[in-house]
Amino acid sequence: MSRHTNAAVSLSDLLWRRPNLLLLILILPPALWLGIIYLGSLFALLAQSFFSIDEFSGVIQYELTLKTYGELFRPANFDIIVRTVVMAGAVTIGAAVVGFPVAYYAARYARGKWKAIFYLGVMMPLWSSYLVKVYSWKLILAKEGILNWLFETLHLGWLLNAYLAIPIIGGNSLSVSSTGTFLVFLYVWIPFMILPIQASLERVPHTMLEASGDLGARPYQTFLHVLLPLALPGVIAGSIFTFSLTLGDYIIPQIVGSSRRFIGQAVYAYQGTAGNIPLAAAFAVVPIVLMAFYLWIAKRKGAFDAL
Amino acid sequence: MKNALKSSVAILLGLTFASQTLAQTMVTELGQGEGQVNIVAWPGYLERGETSPDFDWITSFEEATSCKVNVKTANTSDEMVALMNEGGFDLVTASGDASLRMVAGKRVQPINIDLIPSWSTVDDRLKEAPWHFVEGTHFGVPYMWGPNVLMYSTEVFPEAPTSWNIVFEPMNLPDGAPNEGRVQAYDGPIHIADAANYLMFHKPELGIISPYELNEEQYTAALELLRGQRKLVGRYWHDAFIQIDDFKNEGMAASGTWPFQVGLLQGDGAPVASTIPQEGATGWADSTMMHVDAENPNCSYMWMEHTLASNLQSDLSVWFGANPAVPAACTDGRGMQTAEGCTKNGLDDFERIKFWTTPVSSCESQESCVPYYRWVSDYIGVIGGR
């Protein structure tokens, strides 16, 4: 018993004399988690991408090579990367354009009960299942769905058909077109854009806008030269979410759209059905590189100061 | 780095081989049931009356043998292979594109057919089918099989279409409108085999013997056909229920599909029917296979006997729109299936169906074939418009 007490006392003495040791003990579990489980799996992935698959037998060759990365630049694979990045960019811009006025109203005009309702309205879609939302959008956009019906009833069917006849963004119906994929992405990710913008707008002092007006600026000048620059970190923070989420998603383009693959689907197909893990890993590295670049620019623009 | 990797790979291989030699033994006699059996199955394959009270083929087994059946469903062949690689399961209902992979990977053990009294009732055409009978050894007990049929809208087609060309070639359908945007195709790479099957009939000069064994020239021709098909297809189908929705809400006229979707759509009163056109069709044939390290071998064998002897074969073929591996189940009244029902599901079309197998580079019919992983990457390109 006394020996135990002695041991405990000497241990506490040791920790007192060497604060760094205590720090090490405390930090070890999270460091192991981050180092082994989190970064370890990431490096395992990176390592896989430097292997290659033997063209003839389909067996993975464990020799370091850049051949697999070269395969990313084959036209079919490069298309997938370009398609995904363009979609992620379009969704981000769309979310900023739609989200900004909403966030502005919520931050500047909504008061009391209405503010709560706004928060609720923005957050509520996040409470329901992602899959259910996507499936219901498929029904809304279908050829015999409600949106098409609305156009027909308003005698604007020709307008929709003319739009759908445009190559690339059009298709047989909205639900099998890239526009449909875009709309669903926009809907699903927009809360992640509105909330950071709203947070940054609330931080802009009202007096600044008044001062701008007093100095003779027109509303659009105030918006362009005062409000937007001050809210920009919020927009960029939101764009990080919308951009990276679109970059990695593989379920929406499978349910709504023209079946043309996105990066997430390519990874799924290559590792799951083809057993071509090196190419799947190389594909998975693409969003990492893109996001690293994006975050670097965002940091320079001061997006993280607002968080 | 390289050396470390090599040695770890060597250790891994060593371990695999060590377990293989142990695993190649076959069960020779049966004892008491272990109290449970763990099965990996396709959704809808193992029913205990919970989805619909009329469809139950587990309860009777549990009562008779006191082996509790634990079901784990898997949605793709790849998931099945992955689950069996993880272990912890006794049985799996594997399709032809998964079964050979598991035999090659030594994840399944030989089956002693002498321990399955009803083996003799199995369809002779399936007893030694190449997707479970390898080098003179049985690795599976036939379970169910079915064709990939051509589904069509009866509003567009007053009579059943006679050729797959309505989903492969641009043309006007009987209602006068073009087929562009009104047909679908499966979005799995195995669909290349459907194109090859079509070419086998229409371009005999290519000399295709099996749609799963294609040389470069034959493969290129199949891809070319599929590139033309891309212009006709709005969306490729992946999920059975999304396809059902597309036939209801997107005005689809025709598509290759499983009898499962046809049955569900007809059950909903949708104006669709299905046929196997003149070119024949691809299809799937599933077998029950046993894990090398199965912990409940006695219950496993009892279950395999149950799959052949009970109402399972008959009722499941009604439920899934498939064909029983025991032909007698169509007629002997052990379940709800009837001779007409089996004919409708394609029982008589066995010879016209080319069953799914995984394309490998060392193939039987010619010197070398294009392997599956290239099917995957090229089909992604085709869907992407390349």
Image (spheres, coloured by chain):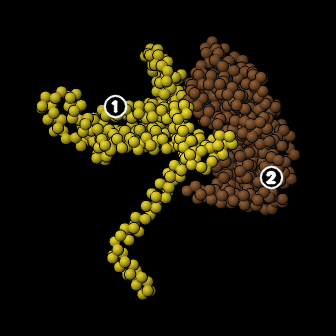
Chain colours: A yellow, B brown
The label number, if any, that marks residue A250 in the structure image: none
Q: Amino acid at mark 1?
A: Val
Neighbour tally class for label 2: few under 14, some 14-19, many 20 plus, Cα within 10 Å: many
In front here: B366 or A82?
Answer: B366
Tell whether B107 sits left or right of A77. Answer: right
Vertical side of B314 occupied by A148: above or below: above
The residue wearing badge 2 is B111
- To which quarter of the image does residue A302 belong? top left
Q: Quadrant of the C terminus of chain B?
A: top right
Neighbour tally class for label 1: few under 14, some 14-19, many 20 plus, Cα within 10 Å: few
Is residue A54 visible to us here?
yes
Q: Amino acid at mark 2?
A: Ile
Chain under numbered label 1: A
Chain under numbered label 2: B
- To which quarter of the image does residue B158 belong? top right
- Which residue is pictured at 43% across the width and 61% down the height? A31
**Tag 1 secondary structure:** helix
Vertical side of A219 occupied by B324: above or below: below
